[in-house]
Amino acid sequence: MTREQQIRFWLIGLGLLLVAMYFLSSVMLPFAAGMAVAYLLDPTCDKLESWGLSRIAATVIVTLAFVVLLLLFVLLLGPLLVGQLIDLLQSLPEVVDNLHKLLQSVLASLQERFGTDILDSLRDSMKDRVGSAVEWATKVLGQVISGGVALVNLLSLVFITPIVAFYLLRDWDKMVAKIDSWLPRHSHDTIVKLAKDADAIIASFIRGQALVCLILGGFYMVGLMLAGLKYGLIVGLVSGLLSFIPFVGSITGLVLSVGLALLQFDDLVRVAIVAGIFFLGQFLEGNFITPKFVGDSTQLHPVWVIFALLAGGALFGFLGVLLAIPVAAVIGVLVRFSIKEYLKSPLYGGEAPAGIEENGGDEG
């Protein structure tokens, strides 16, 4: 088989895989989640095996420990979260009314300073924007309800994911060895090296970022509850989960918490305390938490991460978000490898300078 035939073969296979993922995305979520869980827990199983346990015993222990920790988390925080969510829904009319009064006060101040003409123009513009926002939110909510986050999918995620994770974790080393045996022999070493590079980036980013989200979520939840914010637990949890996307978690949490604090507190000092919690969290994340648990070895630029998550979500929904980081890491490794090969090829026009060959593709 010529090189052109090989390239055509792999491109056709990739295309068929993407088409299958697109049409099966609604049922693939628990399997992708199970694979992600197995990938994250495989080093722990390997460690237990090195201590003399069999693979089956190690898999059972690790899977049970994971499920127990997850259940403990749900049982401990679930009632609090559900209680705050019900309270939020019940008090939503009051929150909207307070927000309306606050906006009226702001508009009155603007009217005194700038006059009625500018105020009328601003009011009309706000009506258009609010109407568009409500229409967009209604459309998104309808897509969420009908497009895959229904109760059946949630139940399949909860019950099928642990089963899939168990079997994949049990056979992980066998699957890796089998895939290795299928690789083209003449490119085996290169493919294995690229796969190891991608694995190092994925492991460093996902495991490190998961710890960052856990620490920040706990910090925000405890801090907002101590500050007396009424729905601090929900806001802190959402902020921690969204911290997986660079800057999005802290910005979202800051806007939500300050907005709720303005409606809840009459004292601006308490509002400033709520805002200060997120500024402190962002400072700790950027200077201590992320460098400690993620480091600079991921080679995933924040802009590339954001684009990958948005593109994955737009193409395949939540499944695409779940697969975005591994795919982005693989693409980055392939781009850096291609650039290095290009710099050594006649297309570049000669030998690359020593520093360029090593660092020329680090932006990918």
Image (cartoon, rainbow, N blue to C red):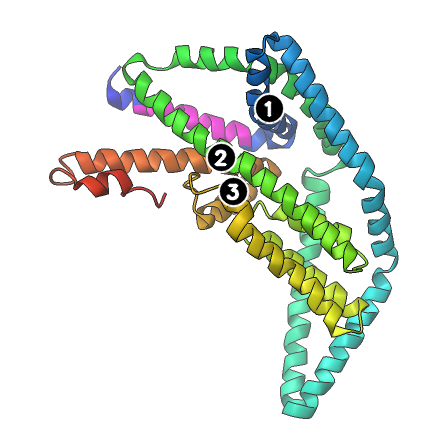
3 sits to left or right of 112:
left
Q: Position of residue 127 (x, y in %)?
A: 68, 73
Front one among 214 and 159 = 214
> From mark 1 to mark 3, how far is it between C-alphas?
21 Å
Q: Which residue, given by chain and number where applicable, does mark 2 sit on?
A: 204
In percent of width and height, residue 249 lies at 61, 52
Determine whether the residue tagged by mark 1 lies in a helix, strand or loop: helix
Q: Residue at x 43, y 43 (%)?
A: 296
Q: Residues in magenta?
A: 7-21
Residue 162 falls inside the magenta stretch: no
- On screen, 140 above or below 151? below
Q: Badge 2 local density, few (<14 within 10 Å), some, or many (20+)?
A: some
Q: Between tags 2 and 3, which lies in front?
A: 3
Quarter of the rendering occupied by the N terminus: top left
Residue picked out by circle 3 = 292
Say what amino acid the circle numbered 1 marks: Leu
Q: Residue at x 77, y 30 (%)?
A: 71
Amino acid marked by disc 2: Ser
For label 1, the residue is 41
Dot 2 or dot 3, earlier in sequence: 2
| Residue at the spot 39% in from the left edge and 29% down from the top edge | 197
